[in-house]
Amino acid sequence: VRTIVVMETEQNAVDALFHSDPEVVVGAVRAIKNSIIGSKSRKCTYMTMGVIPRLVHLVSQNEASARLIKEAVIALGSFAHGTDENIRAVIDSHAIPLLLRGLFFSEMAVVEACVKTTKIIYQSGIAPCELVYEDPGVVPQLVQLLSESSVFAECAAIILTQSCMTSYHQITLCAQDVVPALAPLLVKPWPRCQLAAVMCLATVVHHNQATAFAVAQGMSRLVWQVSFQCFVLLGNGRCYRPDSSELLLAFFCIDASDAVADMSILMACLC
């Protein structure tokens, strides 16, 4: 009996997503969002009922209110918190371009919802990185968000890291002044942001001597000292990435003539 009641409730919520009254739609989105938190079975049920494409459709409507967009985007983020199948369902519904468009919204509550959900999707490693570069305004906007609150900064840094996969991406990020935007995060009292910033810098210089030297020349000695300490901690912990050594090399090799001598210092610090 209980299963039938739950299914009826879920069907009612789905039906309400198509209601003509915007307030009823917002209520239905919120009810679905709240019901799927921590429930894989309900996520699966709602996915089979076509909720994800409907949420994306609601977000895409020009007449949609900021409240509806925010609730729908948060719900999409909840769906993406799960298996790769869940994330692919959100990606396949063409949600990412809408989420990136939401970064330009006038209301910061919507921007926050969009950047958080985008981070969840990109953190999975299966999101198409090229979508970030299709609109030339997206990367500058993400760079701008690095100077906002700790939540915005962490999310933006993670998105930029996960969407930087080629030398073209590295050069593009450097050209958009991602380095001076990331540098202040290294001295902020925000450990999660520090880690996200370090990882982003490591990705920007990965196997790219030109961007490595650009990073080295674009950051102050004080910030580099903090960055060095972060990498030593990373090297001693589970979060260590092999490419982080390249960023440290950029730190030591601000003068290219010292590269050979400083390599031994670098390796000694990482061992």
Image (tube, helix red, strand yellow):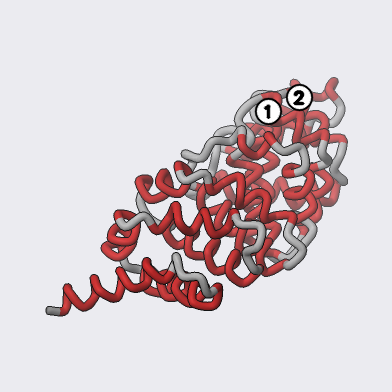
Judging depth in this view, the residue of 197 and 166 nearest the camera is: 166
Q: Residue at x 28, y 60 (%)?
A: 45
- Image quarter where the C terminus lies is top right
Q: Quadrant of residue 136?
A: top right
Mark 2–mark 1 contact, CB under 8 Å?
Answer: yes
Q: Which residue ends up furthest to the front in the rendered image?
A: 20
Seen in the picture, residue 3 relative to 232 is either above or below; the reply is below
Give the SS element for disc 2.
Answer: helix
Of the numbered discs in the image, which one, if any, rests on residue 261?
Answer: 2
Q: Crowding near pointer 1: few (<14 within 10 Å), some, many (20+)?
A: few
Q: Is residue 205 left or right of residue 40?
A: right
Q: CA distance from mark 2 to mark 1?
A: 6 Å
Query: Residue placed at 72% from the left, 67% from the top?
Result: 108
Q: Provide the secondary structure element on which disc 1 rests.
A: helix
Q: How many marks?
A: 2
**Marker disc for residue 264:** 1
Q: Nearer the viewer, residue 63 or 109?
A: 63
Whether residue 236 is visible: no
Give the residue type that dot 1 points to: Ser
Who's the residue at 84% across and 51% down the image? 222
Q: Is residue 137 above or below residue 156?
A: above
Q: Position of residue 243 (x, y in %)?
A: 60, 33
15 on left or right of 58: left
- 133 or 263: nearer the eye? 133
Rendering coords of residue 12 (x, y %):
33, 73
Please say whether residue 198 is visible from this viewpoint: yes
Q: Amino acid at mark 2?
A: Ala
